[in-house]
Amino acid sequence: MRRSILVFVFVLAFGGAAYAAFEITTIETGNTGVSTATAVGPADIPDICYYDAANKMLKVAELTQGAWHIYPVDSDGDVGMNCSLYVDSGDDPHVAYMDNANWDLRYAYRSGGLWSTQTLVSDKPVGLAICMREGPAGWPRITYEEDESGVLTYLWFDGSGQWYTYVVDPVNYMGGRKSGLMVMSQDLNYIAYFDDGLGGLRLAEGNNTQWTNWGVDGEGEWNNLGWDLMAAADDQGELHIAYYDQVEGRLKYAWGPPHSLNIEWIDTHGWCGFPLDLKLDANGRPHVVYFDDGDQMLRYAYRDDVRWHIFEIDHGDHVGEDCSLAVDSQGVVTIAYRDSTAGSLKVARGDSSGLPEFGDDDTAPDDDATPDDDATPSDDDTAPADDDSTPSDDDSTPTDDDADDDLNFYEANPSSGGSCGC
């Protein structure tokens, strides 16, 4: 079914409280802001799609002329969960999302100021693990879990607007977790996804009806690596995947050529990394936003050529859930997230210049380029979550005081490259 609706615009210009170099604004209240996805187009205008749980509908918020405008996109029944978003060359948003009541896959796009919506898949329960990207010809490509069998499925459009689906991995069950689609060319895609059977992160390569797949991290160890994830590809053909280690409660990162990915920690502090989102900036550097359930905190990290830099954006009881981000051509970061206690949608917008790095309470400049918590030159501790009270210890144990039962990733993987940012 295809239909078009007129756009009714609600303009909200709440006064945002400055939070160092990010300005935080509440743009909608009343049990809303679920399943956010954020993107920017050529004009650097940020768009956020989300589910308004109070009204059971899909909405898009767009920042234009200094104010957030809210567009009701689809209110046909109960729709809008698990939404995924991109913005096309004309700065119009496209959204793939779930019909929550019927477990259908739906698609909406804006053209000429009007929103059109249609159902793509309705013959079986679908709608989890949705990820949509724009293909080279301008048509969307979508990955999702076929919920009846639990397998990864790929949907593509031909030049006439007709769409087709194909099961990418008929063997490995996804378990309702995310997929991360990366469009490389007309004939090549990569998909990062979770293998619920073996508990690891997998990668698929192919297009349309020809696919291969292999394990990236944790295969056969049942560590639930990739329990949540997001992925992007840079213009050099290298992949970037941020993913959650559900057993350890930590955030990891894989990057490089598809068949020889490097792996490192992003953040080992607290119980962090679920949910998460990842985007690349104009220079191909990764930016990640994620929730720390242990500290009840929204954190943001980016990686330069040396290491990860980590920052606290907001905190409070269940503040930071349903988070997503986008980075525009000037390096301005837009982070959308839900304050679940208040039931509101919030946005942090700016950059990290002027923010202290998370865990760094030095009164002197860092002596060793790590966010250590004292000014002792001999301190080479990279474990912010160790639980002893010695400020200048050199223990690399992330969660306790002895090293014999801890995971030390770099000792186990000396060729992984990079360094732990936290």
Image (spheres, rainbow, N blue to C red):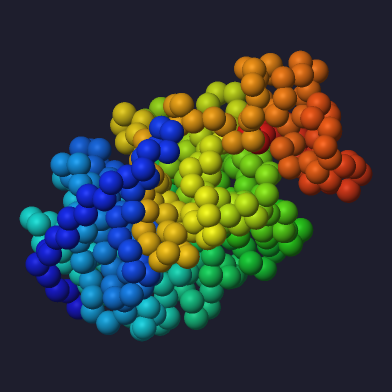
Q: Residue at x 88, y 48 (%)?
A: 405
User: x, y percentage for residue 44?
Assistant: 25, 38
Please tell me whether residue 152 is drawn above or below residue 368 in the rendered image. Answer: below
* Quarter of image, res 232: top left
From where the camera sits, is residue 321 visible?
yes
- Depth order, front residue of 282/69: 69
Q: Position of residue 47 (x, y in %)?
A: 27, 50
Position of residue 123 measured from the top left corner of the image (x, y, whole percent):
36, 83
Q: Quadrant of the N terminus?
A: bottom left
Q: Quadrant of residue 2?
A: bottom left
Comparing 156 with 4, the one in front is 4
Task: Please name the residue shown 54% across and 30% down the image.
Answer: 356
Q: Does residue 283 appear left or right of residue 400 in this picture?
A: left
The residue located at (40%, 66%) in the rendering is 343
State the residue in front, 294 or 278: 294
Task: State whether residue 213 is above or below residue 401.
Answer: below
Q: Relative to residue 252, is residue 69 drawn left or right?
A: left
Q: Nearer the viewer, residue 25 or 1?
A: 25
Image mark count: 0
Q: Taking 11 as reference, is 235 above or below it? A: above
